[in-house]
Amino acid sequence: MKNCDRRRFLLAGAGLVGVASARGISPLRAAENETLTLYNGQHAETTAAIVEAFTRETGVRVAIRRGNSAQLANQILEEGDASPADVFYSEEIAPVLTLAARGLLSTANPDTLKQIPPQFAAKDGAWIGVSARCRVVAYNTDMIKLEALPSTVMDFAKPEWRDKVGFVPTSGEFQAQTLTIVKMKGRDAAVAWLKGLKDNGRIYNGNVAAVQGVQRGEVPVALVNNYYWFRVAEEIGDDKMKCQLYYIGHKDPGALLTLSPAGILKSSKRQDIAQRFLGFLVSAAGQQALVDAVAEYPVRPGVTSPYALKPIDELDPPDITPEDIGDADLARALRREAGLA
Amino acid sequence: MSLAVASSGRRRDAGPPLWLLLAAALPTLLIALPLAYVAARAWSAGLAVAVEEIFRARTAELLVNTVTLAVSVTVLSAVIGVATAWCVERSDLPGLRWWRVIAALPLAVPAFVASFAWASMGAAFQTMGGAILILALSHYPLVYLPVAAALRGMDPGFEDVSRSLGRGPWAAFFSATLPQAWPALGAGSLLVLTHMFAEFGALSLLRVQTFTTAIFDSYELEFDGATAALQSAVLLALALPAALGEMRLRRDMRFARSGKGGRRRAPPARLGRAKAPVLGAMAALAALSLGAPLAMLAYWLLVGRSIGHASHDLWPAVVGTLGLAVPGAIVVTALASPLAIAATRHRGMLSALAEKLPYVVHGLPGLVVALALVFFSIRFFPAAYQTAGLLFAAYAVLFLPLAQSALRASLELAPARLEEVARSLGRGPFGAFAAVTLPNVLPGVGGALALITLELARELTATLMLAPIGVSTLATEVWSQANDGRYAAAAPFAALLVAVSAIPVYVFTRRSLELNDLR
C-alpha cells in the first residue's frame, strides 16, 4: 500500500515535470528578431493594455519582464551592454533618469518627441513621458473636514498633525516631492519637512496600503498619487469610499505633477522596433489604451480619460522640470539626514 | 555510549572521498557567489563610507529591530512548536491523526498572505508586537515538524530513568526528553531565525523595518548598491554566529543518544483534566494561523469587484509555478545531498564549514542573491542568463539549508556501519551507498523535495528577475494584482498557491513523521 502510494506520488511528480517542459519552460532560445523585450516597472495591467494594442497594429510581439521599477533599473545596470532589454518603461521618473545620466539610453525619434509637449520629455530626448499623475492628499471624510486641511503640504510636518498623516517614503513620487521642496524652499526646509514627517507621521510601505489605511480609518490623511484612489475605489465601489482626494493646487509642492517615463536601451539590437514602440506609446491609439486602463493623465493633447479626473488645467502644479527632481543622490542624502534611510 | 564514540570516531576521521568533495564543490561555489558579490560591492564603497555606514544611528536602529524580531519570533516559534509536538506525539489528545497534519498546515500559507490578512484587520497588528505574533504563527511548523519526528523516534528510557529517580513529569521532560530533541529543535530554530533575517514581503505589510527591508529600500533609492552591500554584510555577520552556534550544539549532542536497537514507544501521557484546555489551545492555534488568512481570502472574493479579473491567467500561472518549483526542488535537493552526506559521514572543518555556509547565506534577501547571479551570469555565462537553469541556481543559493536539514535527519538514521558491511562484502564505495544507504534515506529525500517545492512556489524576487521571460507563477500574479489594489483578482491566485502548497506540506509531514515511526 505504502509502496503504491509512493509510486503514484513519483509518477505524479514526473508527469508535472513533463507537462512543464512540454510547455516550454526549459531554457528559452534567444528571442526572435521581431520580438521586442520590454522591462516593465509600470503596473502590469496598464502595460498589457498598451502592448496588446501595439501588437494588434504592428504585428510585433512584445515579451514583458515585470518587476519593481527601481529593481529593474538595478538589474539593467548589472547587465550593462549585454542587457536583453530593448525598452524600459518605469512607473517613476528616478530610475529612468539614472539610466539616462549613465548614458545607457538612446535618443527618441524626433517624430515621437513632436507628439507631446516639450515639458513631458527629456531635454536631450533620452526618454519620453508616457503618462502624468499628480500628488494629492487622501483624507477620511468621517475623521476630518476638507476645510480643516492645510493650504500647503509643508504643514503636515507640524506637531499638530502628530499621528494623523500617512506617507510612503519609499515611493518615487514622494522622493520627487521632497526634491521639489528643495528646489522651491531650499535644502534645510526639505530636511526639516522630512524630519517632521518622520517624527509625526505614519510610514506605509506602499501607496495602495496608505489609501486603504485612510479608508479604514487607521490615519485621517495620507500623501499619495491621484490614481491610487481610483484603484481602491474600483475595487470596493465608489459609493463605499470614505476616503476622498484633496488637490492642494496654487503651485504648492503638494500639487506636483510627475511623469511615468520610457526609454530605449542603447545596447538594444532592435533600435528600429524599439523606436516604433516608443512612438506608439504616445500615439493616439497608445494613449487611449493607456488612459482607459489607468486613472492617469495622457501626455498627448486631445486624448480623454474615462475616469473622473480633475482636469489637468485646474491642477495648477509648481513649475518644476523632471530634471529638477531627478537627483537620486540628493534625495538619498536628505532621507539619510532625516533618519528615514 | 563511549563505545559508540570510539567506533564511530575512527570511521569519521577518514576524510571525505574525492567524488564527494567534487560533488560538494558545485553547491559551495554557488553559495560563494553572493558572498563575493557583497564583498566586492562593499569593498568598492571604500573604508570611510563603510565605517560611516556601519556606525550610523540608523544601523543601530535596524540592528535592534532585526535582532528583536528574529529572536522573538524564533523563541515563540520554538515554544509553540515544542508544545504542539509534545501534545501530538506524547499525549492522549483526541483526534491525534488530524492534529498532526493540521499543526503543519500553516506552512502552506505564505507569510505575506497571512500578514496581509492581519494587517487589514487593524493598525494594532502593524507593529513589532503584531509582526512577532503573526510570523511566529506562520513559522512554528518549521520547529514543530523536526521536534515531533524526534519525539516520536526517541528512546523513552531516559525519561523513565529520570521519573524513577523521583523527578516529576515536567522536570523529567526538561532534564531527559528535551535534551534529546535539542538537535531537531536547534535545526528548526536556526531555519526560523535565518528566515526572519531574510523576510521582506510580510514585514513591509506589517510596517516593521529590518536590515532586509532597508536593503530593499536602498535599492529603491540608489543605483550603485554600496549601502545595500554594506547592509547585507551586516546581515551576514548576524547569521554567522547563529549558524556556528547551531553547529556547536549539534556536535556536542551528536553522541548523547542511547542505541537505536529495541526501541519502544513511550506510553502517551494522560492529559486528564487538561484535555479540554489543550484541545481549545490547539483549535485556537489552527484558527489563528490557518483560519484568519483563509477567511480574509474569502472576504476579498465576496467584496472585491475585480473578481475573476485575470482568471484566464490562472492556468498558465499554475503551470509556471509547478514547472519551476518541481524541477527546481529536484536540482536543489541534488545539490544539497553531497553537503549533507559529507557532514553526517565525515569529520573535518572543511566539510563542517561547507555544510554551514548555506545557512549563513540563507539570511540574505532574495534581491541581493538575484542581483549577484545577474552580475556573474551576464559576465561569465551569458548563454545561461534568464534561463530556468540560472533560476534554479538562485533557488539553490536561497534554499539549500532546507534540503540539507531534511536530508541530514534521515542520513543520521541510516547507520554508516551497514555501508561498511556492504563494502566488506566487495561493493565499491558508490555501489555500497547506492545499495544500502540510498534506500534508507529516500523518505528523507521525499521530505526535502516537498519542503523545497513549497518554498519555491512562493518565491518572488529571484523569480521576477531570473525566470525565462514571459513565465508567470502564482506568486508573481498575487504580487502583480495586489500591487494594483485588485485584491479580489489576487485572491484566487493566493488560494491556489495555498492549495498547491498544501500537497507538499502533507507529503512532508507524513515523510518526516514516518521517518521515525515504528509501525
Image (tube, coloured by chain):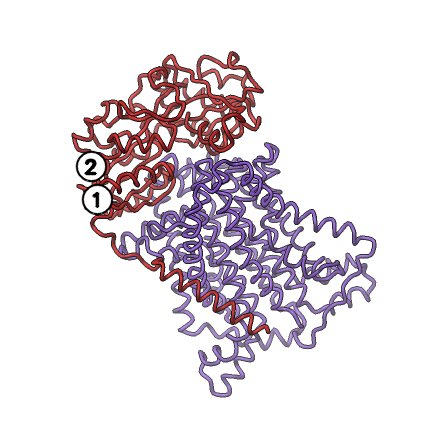
Q: Quadrant of residue B99?
A: bottom right
**Chain of the residue displaying label 2:** A
Residue under the image location 58 percent in, 44 percent down: B293
Q: Which mark is residue A77?
A: none
For label 1, count other residues whose C-alpha is less than 10 Å away and answer few (under 14), some (14-19) or many (20+).
many
Asked whether the beta carbons under mark 1 and mark 2 sit within 8 Å of each other, the answer is yes
Residue at point 55%, 69% (across, down): B443
Q: CA distance from mark 1 to mark 2?
A: 9 Å
10 Å crowding of disc 2: few (<14), some (14-19), many (20+):
many
- Chain B is which colour? purple
Spot occupied by residue B424 in the image (x, y as percentages of width and height): 51, 86
Q: Is residue A193 above or below residue A36?
A: above
Rendered shade, chain A: red
Q: Secondary structure at mark 1?
A: loop
| Quadrant the N terminus of chain B occupies | bottom right
> In the picture, which quadrant includes the C terminus of chain B?
bottom right
Write down the residue under mark 1.
A268
**Nearer-the-camera pick, A22 or B330:** A22
- Give, as a three-letter code, the residue at label 2: Ser
Is there any visible trace of residue B49 in the rendered image? no
Mark 2 lies on residue: A106
Rendered location of residue B152, percent (x, y): 67, 65
In the figure, B516 relative to A271: above or below? below
Q: Earlier in the sequence, mark 1 or mark 2?
A: 2
Residue B444 visible in the displayed image? yes
